[in-house]
């Protein structure tokens, strides 16, 4: 099923799903640095067109896309080994995105069930969030697409969001679920799942990327998020 061409008007939200990288933690620039370093080892550059294809994908798909698009003389397995060594070096203490902590705490205080759906493996997710245990405890559950056996296909397929929604204590109607995403693949996955989406795109993402128009809202920072549009209590 293809993502809808135009988003419907926002409706009241009962459940919220957050992506992790580029939404809760500022890690996308680090991933770009890591991939660029590996590409540079083989005399290659890492252009925005390839970066856009990679955003939001699970690690095996990330490796496949980069190796194929850049024609790297290494296997996907060799790329993943290099990639994960650098992730463990650079991403032990990432920053939170500005405003996301206040948003999460406000939604929690308002009684909105929340979860995280990340393409990362569980061990890497734990490493990246170990300094934010109090904040992560506000989520009912976390789905890690690269290691969860129920997530058969990565973004832009909807599997991770459908699995995540199914694990809420009270199963939501999918059209009442709101996803916060930064990547075109993530927006496509959420829309295909029948959910609403707020996109916080990478500043380098081309303005004409179709996923920008496929989101219900596009914001550059969480301070721009309109709570009332989705039926949330306003910030005091």
Image (tube, grey):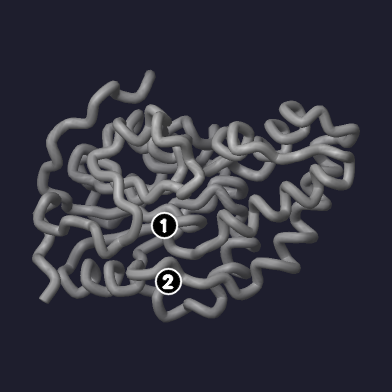
Q: Where's residue 232, x and y in %?
A: 12, 60
Q: Residues within 10 Å of mark 2 (few under 14, many from 20)?
A: some
Determine which quarter of the picture holds residue 72. top right
Is 65 on the left or on the right of 134, as rendered? right
What distance separates the C-alpha of mark 1 from that of mark 2?
9 Å
Q: Identify which residue is drawn at 75% across, 68% down.
A: 89
Determine which quarter of the picture holds residue 110. bottom left
Which of 35 and 125 lies nearest the eye of the viewer? 35
Q: Where's residue 4, x and y in %?
A: 29, 23
Is 73 on the left or on the right of 25, as rendered? right
The secondary structure type at the circle numbered 1 is strand
Q: Identify which residue is drawn at 35% across, 24% down.
A: 3
Q: Identify which residue is drawn at 79% across, 60% down.
A: 85
How many labels sit on residues?
2
Q: Where's residue 28, x and y in %?
A: 56, 54
| Residue furthest to the top | 1
The numbered mark at residue 116 is 1
Viewport quadrant of the N terminus? top left
Q: Residues within 10 Å of mark 1 (few under 14, many from 20)?
A: many
Sequence-first disc among 1 and 2: 1
Q: Which residue is mark 2?
A: 136
The numbered mark at residue 145 is none
Q: Are marks 1 and 2 in contact (CB under 8 Å)?
A: yes
Viewport quadrant of the C terminus? bottom left
The secondary structure type at the circle numbered 2 is helix
Q: Where's residue 214, x and y in %?
A: 30, 31
Q: Is 189 above or below relative to 29? A: above
């Amino acid at each position: 099923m293809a993502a809808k061409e135009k988003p419907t008007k926002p409706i009241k939200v009962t459940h919220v799903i957050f992506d992790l990288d580029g939404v809760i933690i500022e890690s996308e620039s680090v991933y770009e640095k890591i991939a660029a370093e590996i590409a540079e080892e083989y005399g290659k550059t890492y252009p925005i067109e390839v970066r856009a294809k990679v955003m939001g994908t699970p690690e095996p798909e990330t490796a496949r896309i980069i190796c194929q698009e850049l024609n790297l003389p290494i296997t996907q397995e060799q790329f993943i080994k290099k990639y994960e060594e650098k992730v463990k070096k650079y991403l032990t203490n990432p920053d939170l995105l500005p405003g996301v902590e206040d948003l999460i705490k406000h939604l929690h205080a308002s009684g909105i069930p929340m979860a995280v759906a990340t393409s990362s493996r569980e061990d890497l997710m734990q490493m990246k969030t170990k300094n934010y245990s109090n904040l992560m405890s506000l989520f009912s559950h976390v789905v890690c697409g690269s290691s969860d056996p129920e997530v058969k296909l990565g973004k832009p397929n909807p599997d991770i969001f459908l699995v995540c929604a199914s694990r809420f204590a009270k199963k939501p109607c999918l059209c009442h679920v709101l996803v916060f995403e930064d990547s075109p693949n993530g927006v496509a996955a959420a829309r295909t799942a029948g959910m609403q989406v707020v996109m916080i795109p990478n500043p380098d993402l081309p303005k004409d990327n179709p996923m920008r128009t496929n989101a219900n809202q596009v914001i550059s920072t969480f301070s721009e998020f309109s709570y009332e549009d989705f039926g949330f209590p306003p910030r005091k």
